Image (cartoon, helix red, strand yellow):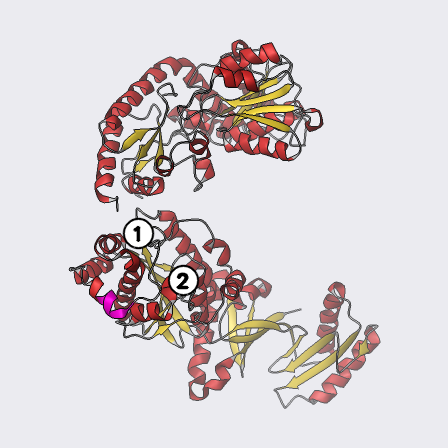
Amino acid sequence: MNILETKIFLDNASTTKPLESVIKTTGEAMHKFYGNASSFHKLGIISEKIIRETRNYILDFLNDSDGNFYFTSGGTESNNLAIFGANNIKNLKIILSSTIEHASVYNSIKYLENSGVKTKYLVPDSNFEISEQKLEDLISSDTDFISIMHVNNETGMILPIERISEIKNKRCPNAIFHVDAVQSFGKIFIDVKKLGIDLLSISAHKIHGPKGIGGLYASKKINLHPILFGGKQQNKVRPGTEPVELISGFKTTVKYENLNIQKNYEYIKKINNYAREKFSEINGIIINSPDSASPYILNISVLDIKSEILLNFLSENNIFVSSSSACTGNSKSHVLTAVNLPENRIESAIRISFSIFNSVQDIDKLCELIKKAQKNLII
Amino acid sequence: MEREILIKFGEIFLKGENKAKFEKALFDNINQKINKFGIFNIKKMGSVFAVSGENTEKILSIIKKIFGISSISYAYKTSKNIEEIKNAAEEEIETKIKNKNIKSFKIEAKRTDKSFYLNSLEICTKIGEFILKKFNLKVDVHNPDLIIKIEIRNHAYVYSEKILGAGGLPVGTSGLGTVMISGGIDSPVATFMMAKRGLKINAVHFSTPPYTSERSVDKVKRILKKISEYSGTIKFFNINFSEIQKEIKKLCAEDLVTIISRRFMSKISQKIAISEKSSCLITGESLGQVASQTVSAINCTSHDIFLPVFRPLIGFDKSEIINISKKIGTFEISIEDFEDCCSLFSPKRPKINPVLKFVQNNELKIKNQDELIKNAIKNCETCEIN
């Protein structure tokens, strides 16, 4: 591919283009702040300071300056650390999760299930709703760990975190509440205290930061055990030399999101609304995402064209979208299957996900190509 | 102590007058393969090539994959001095004893240089006596744990292990073959087998973008790269088959889509073969494996093809094919999960015993066949894979 060609990147739920300022600070940190944060010399102290400042900044942004924050390699590791680090399998009675979690949560819970832990799953209906009754039924007094995503990565569905937290506090106040916020952090404001969240997973590259860095917030009451063993870094909870350059880039991007969160949300909402309107004018397109979904993600089915085929076709024309979630490759979407969408919609579903680098013109171009695909590809 | 790789030829001996030509081809193939990894010198000594250079050990695995070689030995090279030969034998035994439980040995000596002052038997005796004194080993001429081989040529060579070569004939000595390659398990194995019989390989692949992704073409390229470790450079032709495929799907009987597609693919491959001066086609067909590989289906596929079509797997079971594919390292790539060219367009109930006349008539529904084929060839992407 000629890299100078115009590319329309509509796969921002899988990853995002880094901000120029992120590239700059990450590069600068590699140049200047290459000391190991554990070293006693001056360069080490500078690195340590950058890490501390970033940690404090993120904790402030989440509105819990007394909490803990551990840098990890990203969302998958954060979710694993939350699930395996906060729980002692022997003492676990009931874990509550959902059927539409990201693979890193879903497979971790499945692992615990296979080790004998009792599990319960919230199952959204085909309108992507979870009824009050279901919540009341599933959150019981012996639930001791809840892991629920904030925004679903394939459909943008926003899960009722606040309501779950309320019921939890009533029924099982001692249960640990983990939220996978990889798709919402920096896009939708999260107040961990107000929402009663004990553990929160985040990732930098979903919000224009560098890949390979993320983190896990843990409220003060949570006692986390390491899942990797090594040195004394990060209170031994997450040993290993901290990547100062990535953490610098992370800080830059979180600062940017913090300052622009509302403005960006409005902008993305405008693009999303425009896209929904345009798609509704094209025969054969069904919008799968609920109206109440995060505007950053829009899942649609272009009937009679298999997802991969449309994806290849768009890719040839320099528009990049995703079929199902990028992390699970070729397999059929477990999320759309879980909510019981008809087979023909699952097979033809694509995920369009937005960032501040998109515009309504991108949607026009996408619509034009979808129409072309409908004309030429249906056999 | 200096070491050299001794390479012994395979069937080349059988080839009478052509012997020199075959030896040259093998020499060139070895040279081309190993010189990527450093500077090595190859010299011919009778019916053996000796490869010398720095760190010869690292190219052993490469030489093992060159066709036309029956065996390879990693030998100590010394002057023709019996004391030095003893030292080499000692070193060879010491390394072998470390890794294996060795209790008995035997010496085999061969004297190509008849001017050497000891004959084969005398060499065996002298070295044998020396080893008996040095090591706690017994002589066993019938079933020894270790055979020390000594060859007296322009130098003396000492080794104990004979590594099996890849066999076959040097690539290129049988001409140029054109394989129809998919991303599956069979056609890579067929390619390997025909390269083993001395064919240099051109490969034609049919992709159907956007119905198949760029990754599936990349997969085929990675398979060919693996095969090129044996076959040397492969010229790759990627044909965009989408237009033809769609026409067939639109106009022809559903249960004949696969057969008619394969007829088109064969015709295109033959045209490419001829323009590249290749004199045969190769396919991975195995009799009865799928509907398009029954006797009547194969008859329909290649009835209008005049070049010979080699199907080295025709009598193989799937498990036998898989075994070879695992051995040559293409299996792991072949089983990666991408839609390949035929799976999206394959009919639910393909005709198992298609009738040629009927297929030919049905195919005539596509009016602009020549133009479609011409365009496909004109727009084909080529590259060299090695």
Is there CB contact under 8 Å for labels 2 and 1?
Answer: no
Quadrant for residue A199, please give it. top right
Residue drawn at x 48%, y 59% is B330
Q: Which residues are magenta?
A: B355-360
Report x, y in % for residue B113.
Answer: 61, 87
Residue B208 — which label? 1
The crowd level at tag 1 (other Cα within 10 Å; few <14, some 14-19, many 20+) is many
Three-letter amino acid code at the position of disc 1: Thr
Q: Nearer the viewer, residue A142 or B121?
A: A142
Quadrant for residue A113, please give it. top right
Q: Nearer the viewer, residue B252 or A262?
A: B252
User: Which dot, 2 or 1, sits closer to the camera?
Assistant: 2
The crowd level at tag 2 (other Cα within 10 Å; few <14, some 14-19, many 20+) is few
Q: Secondary structure at mark 1?
A: loop
**Between marks 2 and 1, how big is the CA–CA gap?**
21 Å
A61 inside magenta stretch: no
Q: Secondary structure at mark 2?
A: loop
Report x, y in % for residue B20.
Answer: 44, 83
